[in-house]
């Protein structure tokens, strides 16, 4: 159930999820029936407006599928919108400093300097959940993932990894590749950066996750401490399914 995701991440269970890049509640409903541990709506790179995000989260909740939203930015309103709509948690891109990580963590929780309260949301049961329970549930269940993908973040990674309220660091390896001026995520400079983030996370007792394009790399990064993997996407599933059908078709 969605309520267990925060606990499972903290326990460093090996979790497998995927990105959803198509703003479609029906597609989310279908993928919600899969055996994946979670799905992440990619509102940073795909056109998820507030209404379709709400509909997609409803579809995932109806199937009992834990849901993250990779929000467009660290703006507090993006975090609030995702959580009010019923997301299990958020992935916040381009977290570059411990101070920014602290602001992100605060924006996901109620209280001074944090998330504004409304009892009329899906997350609050449309006024059917008492305020004390909603406050407790949010603190106990809302997942906050900080995406690390910039050179500034690499310089401050030891401090970022210790920020309370951040449940997991997620390595944005492609943006790291661009930031490092590399031409491939397999270049040594990129690998060294990923290893550095993993080591800092392990040292701080902070779970770490990542996307990899080559699934054969998974054992290496599991050994380095990674436990949350968001792999592939609905687009890739469609293209691969079509390719498999074409390949199998007798001509």
Image (cartoon, grey):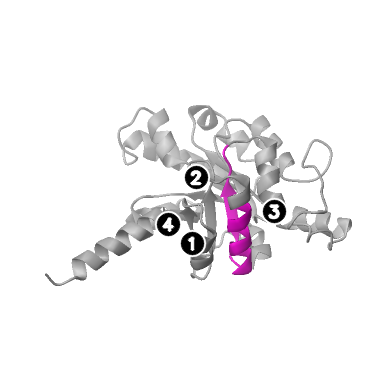
Foreground residue among 105 and 28: 28
Residue identified by numbered label 4 = 234
Structural distance between the alpha carbons of marks 2 and 1? 33 Å
Label 3: state its secondary structure. Answer: loop
**58 in magenta:** yes
Q: Earlier in the sequence, mark 2 or mark 3?
A: 3
Residue identified by numbered label 2 = 198
Confirm or deny contact between disc 3 and disc 1 (CB under 8 A).
no
- Reply above or below: 200 against 153: below
Residue identified by numbered label 1 = 27
Residue identified by numbered label 3 = 142
Foreground residue among 72 and 95: 72
Q: Is residue 195 left or right of residue 39?
A: left
Q: Position of residue 43 (x, y in %)?
A: 54, 45
Magenta region, residue range: 53-72
Q: Earlier in the sequence, mark 2 or mark 1?
A: 1
Label 4: state its secondary structure. Answer: helix
Residue drawn at x 65%, y 48% is 82
**Which tag is nearer the camera, tag 2 or tag 1?**
1
Structural distance between the alpha carbons of marks 3 and 1? 24 Å
Q: Position of residue 84 (x, y in %)?
A: 72, 51
Structural distance between the alpha carbons of marks 2 and 3? 23 Å
């Amino acid at each position: 159930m969605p309520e267990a995701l925060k606990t499972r991440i903290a326990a460093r269970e090996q979790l497998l999820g995927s990105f959803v890049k198509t703003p479609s509640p029906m597609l989310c409903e279908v993928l919600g029936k899969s055996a994946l541990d979670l799905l992440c709506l990619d509102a940073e790179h795909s056109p998820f407006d507030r209404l379709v995000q709400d509909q997609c989260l409803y579809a995932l909740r109806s199937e009992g599928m834990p849901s993250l939203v990779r929000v467009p930015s660290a703006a507090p309103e993006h975090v609030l919108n995702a959580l009010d709509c019923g997301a299990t948690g958020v992935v916040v891109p381009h977290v570059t400093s411990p101070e920014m990580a602290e602001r992100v963590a605060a924006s996901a929780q109620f209280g001074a300097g944090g998330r504004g309260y409304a009892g009329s949301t899906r997350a609050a049961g449309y006024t059917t959940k008492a305020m004390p329970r909603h406050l407790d549930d949010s603190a106990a269940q809302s997942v906050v993932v900080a995406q690390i993908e910039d050179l500034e973040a690499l310089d401050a990674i030891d401090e970022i990894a210790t920020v309370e309220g951040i449940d997991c660091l997620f390595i944005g390896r492609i943006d790291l590749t661009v930031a490092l001026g590399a031409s491939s995520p397999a270049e040594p400079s990129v690998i060294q950066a990923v290893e550095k983030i993993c080591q800092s996370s392990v040292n701080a007792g902070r779970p770490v996750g990542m996307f990899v394009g080559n699934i054969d790399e998974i054992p290496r990064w599991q050994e380095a401490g990674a436990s949350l993997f968001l792999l592939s996407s609905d687009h890739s599933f469609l293209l691969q399914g079509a390719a498999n059908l074409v390949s199998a078709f007798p001509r």
